[in-house]
Amino acid sequence: MKIEISQRLKNLPPYLFAEIDRMKKEAIVNGRDIIDLGVGDPDMPTPIHIIESLYESAQNPANHRYALNYGMPLLRNEMASWYKKRFQVKLNPDTEILPLIGSKEGIAHIPLAFINPGDEAIIPDPCYPPYISGTIFAGGVCHIVPMLESNGFFPDLDKIDCQVAKRAKLIFLNYPNNPTAAIANEEFFKKVVDFATENNIIVCHDAAYSEIYFDGCKPLSFLQIDGAKEIGVEFHSLSKTYNMTGWRIGFAIGSSEIIKALAAVKSNIDSGIFQAVQFAGIVAMKTDKSHINSLSQMYKSRRDVLADGLNALGWKVPKPKATFYVWMPVPPGSTSTEFSKMLLEKCDIVTTPGIGFGRNGEGYIRMALTVSEDRLKEAVGRIKKLHEK
Ligand SMILES: *Cc1c(COP(=O)(O)O)cnc(C)c1O
Protein backbone atom coordinates (compact mmCIF):
# COMPACT_ATOMS: atom_id res chain seq x y z
CA MET A 1 0.00 0.00 0.00
CA LYS A 2 1.15 3.49 -0.77
CA ILE A 3 0.94 5.75 2.24
CA GLU A 4 0.60 9.37 1.33
CA ILE A 5 0.67 12.15 3.88
CA SER A 6 -1.81 15.02 3.71
CA GLN A 7 -1.15 18.24 1.90
CA ARG A 8 -1.36 20.10 5.22
CA LEU A 9 1.58 18.12 6.55
CA LYS A 10 3.49 18.70 3.33
CA ASN A 11 2.74 22.42 3.63
CA LEU A 12 4.60 22.78 6.94
CA PRO A 13 7.85 24.71 6.71
CA PRO A 14 10.95 22.51 6.49
CA TYR A 15 12.52 21.37 9.74
CA LEU A 16 15.81 23.22 9.89
CA PHE A 17 17.45 21.66 12.93
CA ALA A 18 18.04 18.20 11.45
CA GLU A 19 21.75 18.74 10.82
CA ILE A 20 22.37 20.24 14.29
CA ASP A 21 20.31 17.45 15.89
CA ARG A 22 22.41 14.86 14.07
CA MET A 23 25.64 16.53 15.15
CA LYS A 24 24.45 16.74 18.75
CA LYS A 25 23.47 13.05 18.83
CA GLU A 26 26.80 12.08 17.33
CA ALA A 27 28.68 14.19 19.89
CA ILE A 28 26.78 12.52 22.74
CA VAL A 29 27.41 9.02 21.33
CA ASN A 30 31.09 9.89 21.13
CA GLY A 31 31.05 10.73 24.82
CA ARG A 32 31.73 14.44 24.38
CA ASP A 33 30.68 16.68 27.29
CA ILE A 34 27.88 18.68 25.69
CA ILE A 35 26.55 21.91 27.20
CA ASP A 36 23.02 22.14 25.82
CA LEU A 37 21.74 25.71 25.49
CA GLY A 38 19.39 24.60 22.75
CA VAL A 39 16.19 23.60 24.49
CA GLY A 40 13.78 26.02 26.16
CA ASP A 41 12.90 23.66 28.98
CA PRO A 42 13.57 24.61 32.64
CA ASP A 43 16.25 22.40 34.21
CA MET A 44 15.00 22.78 37.79
CA PRO A 45 12.44 20.34 39.21
CA THR A 46 8.80 21.20 39.91
CA PRO A 47 8.51 22.53 43.51
CA ILE A 48 7.92 19.67 45.95
CA HIS A 49 4.57 20.88 47.32
CA ILE A 50 3.12 20.64 43.79
CA ILE A 51 4.46 17.13 43.31
CA GLU A 52 3.01 16.09 46.68
CA SER A 53 -0.36 17.48 45.67
CA LEU A 54 -0.33 15.39 42.50
CA TYR A 55 0.69 12.31 44.48
CA GLU A 56 -2.23 12.78 46.80
CA SER A 57 -4.83 13.56 44.13
CA ALA A 58 -3.64 10.70 41.93
CA GLN A 59 -4.71 8.26 44.67
CA ASN A 60 -8.32 9.36 44.61
CA PRO A 61 -10.32 7.24 42.12
CA ALA A 62 -12.70 10.16 41.58
CA ASN A 63 -9.83 11.80 39.69
CA HIS A 64 -9.24 8.84 37.38
CA ARG A 65 -12.21 9.49 35.14
CA TYR A 66 -12.65 11.75 32.14
CA ALA A 67 -12.24 15.34 33.29
CA LEU A 68 -14.67 18.13 32.54
CA ASN A 69 -13.83 19.75 29.24
CA TYR A 70 -13.96 23.25 30.69
CA GLY A 71 -11.89 22.17 33.70
CA MET A 72 -13.12 22.13 37.30
CA PRO A 73 -14.82 25.36 38.43
CA LEU A 74 -12.32 25.34 41.31
CA LEU A 75 -9.47 25.48 38.80
CA ARG A 76 -11.01 28.28 36.75
CA ASN A 77 -11.65 30.26 39.94
CA GLU A 78 -8.01 29.88 40.93
CA MET A 79 -6.87 30.96 37.46
CA ALA A 80 -9.08 34.05 37.75
CA SER A 81 -7.72 34.97 41.16
CA TRP A 82 -4.09 34.30 40.16
CA TYR A 83 -4.57 36.56 37.14
CA LYS A 84 -6.41 39.26 39.11
CA LYS A 85 -3.71 39.34 41.77
CA ARG A 86 -0.97 39.68 39.17
CA PHE A 87 -2.62 41.97 36.62
CA GLN A 88 -5.54 43.62 38.46
CA VAL A 89 -8.02 42.59 35.77
CA LYS A 90 -11.21 40.76 36.71
CA LEU A 91 -12.29 37.78 34.61
CA ASN A 92 -15.49 35.78 34.67
CA PRO A 93 -14.25 32.26 35.47
CA ASP A 94 -17.27 30.69 33.75
CA THR A 95 -17.04 32.45 30.40
CA GLU A 96 -13.67 34.15 30.06
CA ILE A 97 -11.27 31.37 31.11
CA LEU A 98 -10.51 28.06 29.42
CA PRO A 99 -8.00 25.57 30.86
CA LEU A 100 -5.69 24.04 28.25
CA ILE A 101 -3.49 20.97 28.01
CA GLY A 102 -0.53 23.32 27.96
CA SER A 103 -0.78 26.67 26.20
CA LYS A 104 0.76 25.21 23.02
CA GLU A 105 -2.34 23.07 22.68
CA GLY A 106 -4.65 26.10 22.67
CA ILE A 107 -2.34 28.10 20.42
CA ALA A 108 -2.18 25.32 17.84
CA HIS A 109 -5.96 24.73 17.92
CA ILE A 110 -7.32 28.28 17.91
CA PRO A 111 -6.99 28.78 14.12
CA LEU A 112 -9.43 25.87 13.67
CA ALA A 113 -12.08 28.03 15.34
CA PHE A 114 -11.72 31.07 13.07
CA ILE A 115 -9.75 30.33 9.91
CA ASN A 116 -11.48 29.12 6.78
CA PRO A 117 -9.40 27.65 3.94
CA GLY A 118 -7.42 30.50 2.37
CA ASP A 119 -7.98 32.94 5.26
CA GLU A 120 -4.97 34.86 6.45
CA ALA A 121 -3.30 35.06 9.84
CA ILE A 122 -0.69 37.72 10.57
CA ILE A 123 2.39 36.17 12.11
CA PRO A 124 5.50 37.96 13.35
CA ASP A 125 8.86 36.54 12.30
CA PRO A 126 10.92 35.22 14.09
CA CYS A 127 8.36 33.29 16.15
CA TYR A 128 7.40 30.24 18.17
CA PRO A 129 6.62 27.69 15.39
CA PRO A 130 3.05 26.60 16.43
CA TYR A 131 1.59 29.94 15.24
CA ILE A 132 2.55 28.87 11.75
CA SER A 133 1.73 25.17 11.93
CA GLY A 134 -1.63 25.85 13.61
CA THR A 135 -2.58 28.26 10.84
CA ILE A 136 -1.50 25.85 8.12
CA PHE A 137 -3.39 22.93 9.70
CA ALA A 138 -6.55 25.06 9.57
CA GLY A 139 -5.99 25.63 5.85
CA GLY A 140 -4.97 29.24 6.46
CA VAL A 141 -2.28 31.34 4.87
CA CYS A 142 0.47 32.90 6.99
CA HIS A 143 1.10 36.56 6.32
CA ILE A 144 4.58 36.98 7.76
CA VAL A 145 5.58 40.36 9.20
CA PRO A 146 9.18 40.99 10.22
CA MET A 147 10.10 41.77 13.83
CA LEU A 148 13.29 43.75 13.55
CA GLU A 149 15.73 44.79 16.24
CA SER A 150 15.61 48.34 14.82
CA ASN A 151 11.90 48.40 15.74
CA GLY A 152 12.41 46.93 19.23
CA PHE A 153 11.35 43.50 17.92
CA PHE A 154 7.79 44.75 17.44
CA PRO A 155 6.06 44.12 14.12
CA ASP A 156 5.44 47.45 12.36
CA LEU A 157 1.64 47.43 12.12
CA ASP A 158 1.59 50.59 9.99
CA LYS A 159 3.51 48.76 7.29
CA ILE A 160 0.95 45.98 6.93
CA ASP A 161 -0.82 46.33 3.59
CA CYS A 162 -4.35 47.61 4.27
CA GLN A 163 -5.89 44.93 2.02
CA VAL A 164 -4.09 42.27 4.04
CA ALA A 165 -5.23 43.91 7.27
CA LYS A 166 -8.84 43.95 6.04
CA ARG A 167 -8.72 40.28 5.06
CA ALA A 168 -6.80 38.87 8.03
CA LYS A 169 -8.72 36.93 10.68
CA LEU A 170 -6.07 36.52 13.37
CA ILE A 171 -2.82 38.00 14.57
CA PHE A 172 -0.39 36.15 16.83
CA LEU A 173 1.81 38.07 19.26
CA ASN A 174 4.12 36.96 22.04
CA TYR A 175 5.61 39.14 24.79
CA PRO A 176 7.90 38.59 26.61
CA ASN A 177 9.08 37.14 23.33
CA ASN A 178 10.62 33.82 22.47
CA PRO A 179 13.19 33.96 20.84
CA THR A 180 14.11 37.68 20.98
CA ALA A 181 13.36 38.25 24.72
CA ALA A 182 11.65 41.59 23.89
CA ILE A 183 9.01 42.96 26.30
CA ALA A 184 5.95 44.85 25.06
CA ASN A 185 5.07 48.29 26.37
CA GLU A 186 1.66 49.85 26.79
CA GLU A 187 2.08 52.01 23.70
CA PHE A 188 2.58 48.97 21.48
CA PHE A 189 -0.34 47.06 22.99
CA LYS A 190 -2.60 50.10 22.50
CA LYS A 191 -1.61 50.22 18.84
CA VAL A 192 -2.47 46.53 18.57
CA VAL A 193 -5.94 47.12 20.06
CA ASP A 194 -6.58 49.98 17.60
CA PHE A 195 -5.28 47.99 14.63
CA ALA A 196 -7.30 44.88 15.51
CA THR A 197 -10.50 46.78 16.32
CA GLU A 198 -10.32 48.77 13.11
CA ASN A 199 -9.72 45.72 10.95
CA ASN A 200 -11.79 43.19 12.84
CA ILE A 201 -8.85 40.92 13.65
CA ILE A 202 -8.71 38.53 16.60
CA VAL A 203 -5.57 39.01 18.71
CA CYS A 204 -3.94 35.89 20.13
CA HIS A 205 -1.34 36.98 22.65
CA ASP A 206 1.03 34.36 24.04
CA ALA A 207 2.16 35.33 27.56
CA ALA A 208 4.01 32.12 28.51
CA TYR A 209 6.95 34.10 29.94
CA SER A 210 4.99 36.74 31.88
CA GLU A 211 6.58 35.73 35.20
CA ILE A 212 10.21 35.50 34.16
CA TYR A 213 11.60 39.03 34.17
CA PHE A 214 14.54 40.98 35.56
CA ASP A 215 15.70 44.44 36.58
CA GLY A 216 12.16 45.44 37.62
CA CYS A 217 10.77 45.14 34.07
CA LYS A 218 7.44 43.57 35.01
CA PRO A 219 5.60 42.47 31.84
CA LEU A 220 2.09 43.71 31.08
CA SER A 221 -0.86 41.56 30.15
CA PHE A 222 -2.49 42.39 26.83
CA LEU A 223 -5.89 42.34 28.58
CA GLN A 224 -4.87 45.27 30.77
CA ILE A 225 -5.40 47.52 27.75
CA ASP A 226 -8.84 49.12 27.29
CA GLY A 227 -10.80 47.31 24.59
CA ALA A 228 -8.44 44.30 24.46
CA LYS A 229 -10.91 41.89 26.03
CA GLU A 230 -13.42 42.53 23.22
CA ILE A 231 -11.02 41.55 20.45
CA GLY A 232 -8.54 39.10 21.89
CA VAL A 233 -7.39 36.23 24.02
CA GLU A 234 -4.21 35.71 25.97
CA PHE A 235 -2.48 32.38 26.54
CA HIS A 236 -0.96 31.62 29.92
CA SER A 237 1.08 28.66 31.01
CA LEU A 238 2.20 27.06 34.25
CA SER A 239 5.11 25.47 32.38
CA LYS A 240 7.83 28.05 32.76
CA THR A 241 6.51 29.78 35.90
CA TYR A 242 6.43 26.62 38.02
CA ASN A 243 8.87 24.35 36.14
CA MET A 244 5.97 22.19 34.97
CA THR A 245 6.59 21.77 31.24
CA GLY A 246 5.84 18.04 31.29
CA TRP A 247 2.61 18.36 33.26
CA ARG A 248 0.64 20.03 30.46
CA ILE A 249 -1.45 22.76 32.02
CA GLY A 250 -2.14 26.29 30.84
CA PHE A 251 -5.14 28.49 30.07
CA ALA A 252 -6.66 30.96 27.66
CA ILE A 253 -8.44 34.10 28.87
CA GLY A 254 -10.29 36.92 27.18
CA SER A 255 -13.32 37.50 24.97
CA SER A 256 -16.09 35.07 25.96
CA GLU A 257 -17.05 34.58 22.31
CA ILE A 258 -13.52 33.63 21.32
CA ILE A 259 -13.15 31.38 24.38
CA LYS A 260 -16.43 29.65 23.54
CA ALA A 261 -15.31 28.90 19.96
CA LEU A 262 -11.96 27.52 21.13
CA ALA A 263 -13.79 25.36 23.68
CA ALA A 264 -16.05 24.01 20.92
CA VAL A 265 -13.00 22.94 18.88
CA LYS A 266 -11.38 21.32 21.89
CA SER A 267 -14.48 19.44 22.97
CA ASN A 268 -14.16 17.53 19.71
CA ILE A 269 -10.48 16.75 20.18
CA ASP A 270 -9.55 16.21 23.82
CA SER A 271 -11.23 15.36 27.09
CA GLY A 272 -9.67 17.84 29.43
CA ILE A 273 -6.68 17.87 31.78
CA PHE A 274 -6.14 14.89 34.11
CA GLN A 275 -8.02 15.99 37.22
CA ALA A 276 -5.11 15.25 39.56
CA VAL A 277 -3.03 17.66 37.47
CA GLN A 278 -5.82 20.23 37.78
CA PHE A 279 -5.62 19.96 41.59
CA ALA A 280 -1.84 20.25 41.43
CA GLY A 281 -2.25 23.29 39.18
CA ILE A 282 -4.42 24.94 41.83
CA VAL A 283 -1.73 24.30 44.43
CA ALA A 284 0.92 25.65 42.02
CA MET A 285 -0.94 28.91 41.46
CA LYS A 286 -1.21 29.38 45.23
CA THR A 287 2.58 29.11 45.57
CA ASP A 288 4.17 31.89 47.55
CA LYS A 289 5.41 34.77 45.41
CA SER A 290 8.93 34.20 46.70
CA HIS A 291 9.14 31.22 44.32
CA ILE A 292 8.79 33.48 41.28
CA ASN A 293 11.28 35.97 42.71
CA SER A 294 13.93 33.33 43.29
CA LEU A 295 13.30 31.73 39.90
CA SER A 296 13.84 35.05 38.13
CA GLN A 297 16.87 35.74 40.34
CA MET A 298 18.38 32.44 39.25
CA TYR A 299 17.92 33.14 35.53
CA LYS A 300 19.24 36.66 36.04
CA SER A 301 22.47 35.40 37.64
CA ARG A 302 22.88 32.93 34.81
CA ARG A 303 22.23 35.67 32.26
CA ASP A 304 24.93 37.82 33.84
CA VAL A 305 27.47 34.97 33.92
CA LEU A 306 26.95 34.24 30.23
CA ALA A 307 26.58 37.79 28.92
CA ASP A 308 29.34 39.36 31.06
CA GLY A 309 31.64 36.43 30.31
CA LEU A 310 31.18 36.64 26.54
CA ASN A 311 31.20 40.44 26.44
CA ALA A 312 34.57 40.39 28.20
CA LEU A 313 35.81 38.49 25.13
CA GLY A 314 34.55 41.25 22.85
CA TRP A 315 31.24 39.60 21.93
CA LYS A 316 28.09 41.68 21.66
CA VAL A 317 25.64 39.88 23.89
CA PRO A 318 22.52 41.85 24.90
CA LYS A 319 21.15 41.25 28.39
CA PRO A 320 17.51 40.19 28.17
CA LYS A 321 14.98 41.80 30.56
CA ALA A 322 12.67 38.78 30.48
CA THR A 323 12.45 35.10 29.40
CA PHE A 324 15.34 32.69 29.83
CA TYR A 325 16.80 33.29 26.37
CA VAL A 326 19.79 35.23 25.17
CA TRP A 327 19.24 36.35 21.57
CA MET A 328 22.60 37.24 20.20
CA PRO A 329 23.77 38.55 16.83
CA VAL A 330 26.32 36.29 15.14
CA PRO A 331 29.58 37.82 13.93
CA PRO A 332 29.48 39.18 10.37
CA GLY A 333 30.50 36.67 7.75
CA SER A 334 28.73 33.60 9.09
CA THR A 335 25.12 32.46 9.00
CA SER A 336 23.30 31.49 12.16
CA THR A 337 23.57 27.82 11.20
CA GLU A 338 27.30 28.03 10.47
CA PHE A 339 27.93 29.80 13.77
CA SER A 340 25.86 27.28 15.72
CA LYS A 341 27.69 24.40 14.07
CA MET A 342 31.03 25.97 14.86
CA LEU A 343 30.12 26.28 18.57
CA LEU A 344 29.07 22.64 18.61
CA GLU A 345 32.12 21.36 16.75
CA LYS A 346 34.76 23.43 18.52
CA CYS A 347 33.25 23.95 22.00
CA ASP A 348 30.66 21.17 22.43
CA ILE A 349 28.03 23.87 23.04
CA VAL A 350 24.54 23.46 21.56
CA THR A 351 22.71 26.66 20.55
CA THR A 352 19.71 27.27 18.29
CA PRO A 353 20.31 29.03 14.95
CA GLY A 354 17.92 31.96 14.56
CA ILE A 355 16.85 30.90 11.08
CA GLY A 356 14.87 28.09 12.73
CA PHE A 357 12.40 30.72 14.01
CA GLY A 358 11.93 32.32 10.58
CA ARG A 359 13.83 34.31 7.94
CA ASN A 360 14.23 37.32 10.16
CA GLY A 361 15.91 35.16 12.78
CA GLU A 362 18.89 34.85 10.42
CA GLY A 363 21.92 36.61 11.84
CA TYR A 364 21.17 35.53 15.43
CA ILE A 365 21.49 32.52 17.67
CA ARG A 366 19.38 31.71 20.74
CA MET A 367 20.98 30.46 23.92
CA ALA A 368 18.71 29.11 26.67
CA LEU A 369 19.71 29.81 30.27
CA THR A 370 18.50 26.37 31.31
CA VAL A 371 21.80 24.99 32.62
CA SER A 372 23.57 25.82 35.89
CA GLU A 373 25.81 28.83 36.44
CA ASP A 374 28.81 26.49 36.66
CA ARG A 375 28.04 25.03 33.25
CA LEU A 376 27.63 28.51 31.80
CA LYS A 377 31.03 29.46 33.24
CA GLU A 378 32.41 26.33 31.63
CA ALA A 379 30.81 27.37 28.32
CA VAL A 380 32.40 30.82 28.55
CA GLY A 381 35.75 29.17 29.39
CA ARG A 382 35.57 26.97 26.30
CA ILE A 383 34.77 29.93 24.07
CA LYS A 384 37.65 31.87 25.64
CA LYS A 385 40.05 29.07 24.69
CA LEU A 386 38.76 29.32 21.15
CA HIS A 387 39.78 32.99 21.11
CA GLU A 388 43.27 32.16 22.45
CA LYS A 389 43.98 29.65 19.68
C1 LIG B 1 7.25 27.31 26.25
C2 LIG B 1 6.35 28.17 25.45
C3 LIG B 1 4.97 28.04 25.56
C4 LIG B 1 4.34 27.17 26.61
O1 LIG B 1 4.03 25.97 26.25
P1 LIG B 1 3.15 25.01 27.15
O2 LIG B 1 2.41 24.30 26.09
O3 LIG B 1 2.26 25.82 28.03
O4 LIG B 1 4.11 24.17 27.88
C5 LIG B 1 4.15 28.88 24.81
N1 LIG B 1 4.68 29.82 24.02
C6 LIG B 1 6.00 29.99 23.91
C7 LIG B 1 6.52 31.09 23.07
C8 LIG B 1 6.88 29.16 24.61
O5 LIG B 1 8.20 29.31 24.47
Image (tube, rainbow, N blue to C red):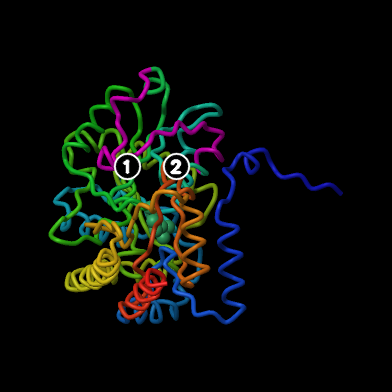
Q: Which mark is residue 233?
A: 1
Say what secondary structure mark 2 lies in.
helix
Q: Residue at x 52, y 29 (%)?
A: 116
Q: Is residue 271 magenta?
A: no
Answer with mark 2 or mark 1, whichever residue precedes in sequence.
2
**For the residue carrying disc 2, how many other residues have a C-alpha within 10 Å: few (<14), some (14-19), or many (20+)?**
many
Q: Which mark is residue 110?
A: 2
In the image, residue 172 sits, relative to residue 324, either above or below, namely above
Residue 138 spot, x, y in % from top left: 54, 37
Q: Nearer the viewer, residue 31 or 386?
A: 386
In the image, residue 258 sits, relative to residue 367, either above or below, namely above
Name which residue type carries label 1. Val
Left or right: where 115 falls relative to 282: right
Q: Nearer the viewer, residue 178 or 9?
A: 178
Give yes or no for contact between labels 2 and 1 (Cβ–Cβ under 8 Å). yes
Say what secondary structure mark 1 lies in.
strand
Question: Magenta segment, which residues?
Answer: 134-162
- Spatial separation of the CA atoms under disc 2 and disc 1: 10 Å
Quadrant for residue 167, please give it. top left
Q: Which mark is residue 373?
A: none
